[in-house]
Image: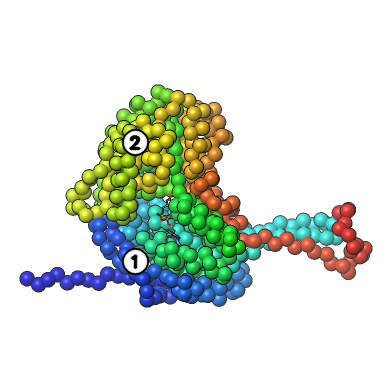
Amino acid sequence: MNKPVETPLATVPLWINGKPVLPAGRLGEVYDPAAGRVAKRVPYANAQTVDAAVKAAAAALPAWRDTPPLRRARAMQKFLQLLQAHQKELAQLVTEEHGKTLPDATGSVQRGIEVVEFACGIPHLLKGEYSENVGTTVDTHTVRQPVGVCAGITPFNFPVMVPMWMFPVAIACGNTFVLKPSEKVPSASVRMAELFKEAGLPDGVLNVVHGDKEAVDAILAHPGIAAVSFVGSTPIAKHIYETCAKNGKRVQALGGAKNHAVVLPDADLDFTADALIGAAYGSAGERCMAISAVVAVGAAADPLVALLEKKARAIKIGPGEREGIDMGPLVTAQHRDKVASYIDLGVKEGARLVVDGRGLKVSGAEDGFFLGTSLFDRVQPAMRIYQDEIFGPVLVVLRVNTLEEAIALVNRNPYANGTAIFTESGGAARRFENEIQVGMVGVNVPIPVPVAFYSFGGWKSSLFGDLHVHGVEGVKFYTRTKVITTRWPHQDTPAPGFHMPTLG
Ligand code: NAD
């Protein structure tokens, strides 16, 4: 019998100066997590390759920043049309490399596309302020100018949406961009860069480099990069923030999360349990806005845990492209094993394991990186399964007696990305909104999803920096304000004095 012919693995290129590039050097592996095998390879950029991308972006900057915002917006509009036409293809790339289900991937691509829709309005968003007669015949106005070459470093869990939180707004503002997507999910970024070129974006305005710490460190050290946007885990976010600050770069670094849902006894518990199940286990819990801790108040606890148990057991797990699947695999075997080790730990710590996701085998996909849904009850704040971000399909329930206790518990947690309250009481919800120290809050909404024309970002250890991504805050991040004061001296006015004027 003939040996089966092995097809060589595809290599995902970098994208520099409007062309695909395959540099020599280290190669990484890209998995198909549902099949549990290596599907592609990806070259890792070193400092020299990063420098080539920054040089391309710097060369493209003068012409792009002087392109009228209206024309930049027209390129955005064409890009928007191409993204809409290729939404399914992009979602498929997300499912292939990340593992999430196709409908979930399609929704995440849609959220990214909405940022491009927002960026189409850039001429309006860049308008400055004007004051006549700040002094006698002296006028002042402001303009928002691009900051220069910007970089984006993104995580594995949203291969399309998170890069699109960054580069469309930066580029619409007149900057040029170097994107370093997660090396685990590199393909979608390159495809977006190709589509943007097709939309008429000049070469060098958007570049994509792949890689790990070596590429990131080269970005952080590069004197040609003016601003860095990062989304990923908290320890790396902190490192990015500190290094950029030391190197004089503008920086926004979004970190990890432990998002609490507080459930009051007056909540509609069936509705709440449905909402929590999707928020906890959707995308296999690999969402920065996943609900990973439920704080059940008083009499809500027993019936809520019973409902969560029933619904968690009913979740259909399998390859993300299969019809009718709720939850796909985890991104890598290593990550699946790390998440599973937290289930072992929770049992050791003394929490009650209500649903155990370990040892799941998916028929027809036995080698995939699957893990079933897990639910812990009676979790204590001192346990590591509560303190750490597990980033997998593990939901923990803590029990408290009052809303005050619930608010205090959420506010003591160092993470502060998102949180939600489930209640029928407007007064309780208002108090929660007011007192909770978290960046994004849902009221009977488990995941306050990113809306492009609002900003997105957490507080405390979930965000290092001052400005959130996209929305008006994104425009502020990617522009510098210049204040211009003007006088035309040929008018009949006194000559300027020596001291700072005391009268207007
Ligand atoms: P990660 O921190 O491991 O990686 C993020 C990026 O940093 C990747 O591009 C990676 O190549 C790079 N990186 C990894 N290690 C590095 C190092 N030592 N030095 C320099 N760069 C390094 O995160 P991840 O596992 O890809 O993504 C999951 C994390 O992202 C979770 O913590 C999740 O909460 C977080 N996240 C946060 C948000 C948010 O909006 N706050 C959104 C999505 C994901």
Q: As displayed, is residue 252 above or below residue 437?
A: below
Rendering colour mode: rainbow
SS at mark 2 in the image: helix
Q: For the residue marked with disc 1, what is the amino acid?
A: Gly
Position of 442 with respect to 185 (left or right) is right
Q: Which dot, 1 or 2, sits closer to the camera?
A: 2
Is 161 positioned to the left or the right of 36 in the image? right
- The residue located at (54%, 45%) in the rendering is 459
Residue 342 locus on image (x, y percent)? 33, 43
Which quadrant of the rendered structure holds the C terminus? bottom right
Residue 312, quarter of picture: top left
Q: Identify residue for label 1.
A: 28
From mark 1 to mark 2, how far is it between C-alphas? 36 Å
Looking at the picture, how far across and down is residue 423, in whole percent? 46, 29
In the rendered view of the protein, which quadrant contains the N terminus? Answer: bottom left
Which quarter is ligand 1 in? bottom left
Closer-to-camera residue (477/130) = 477
Q: Amino acid at mark 2?
A: Glu
SS for callout 1: strand
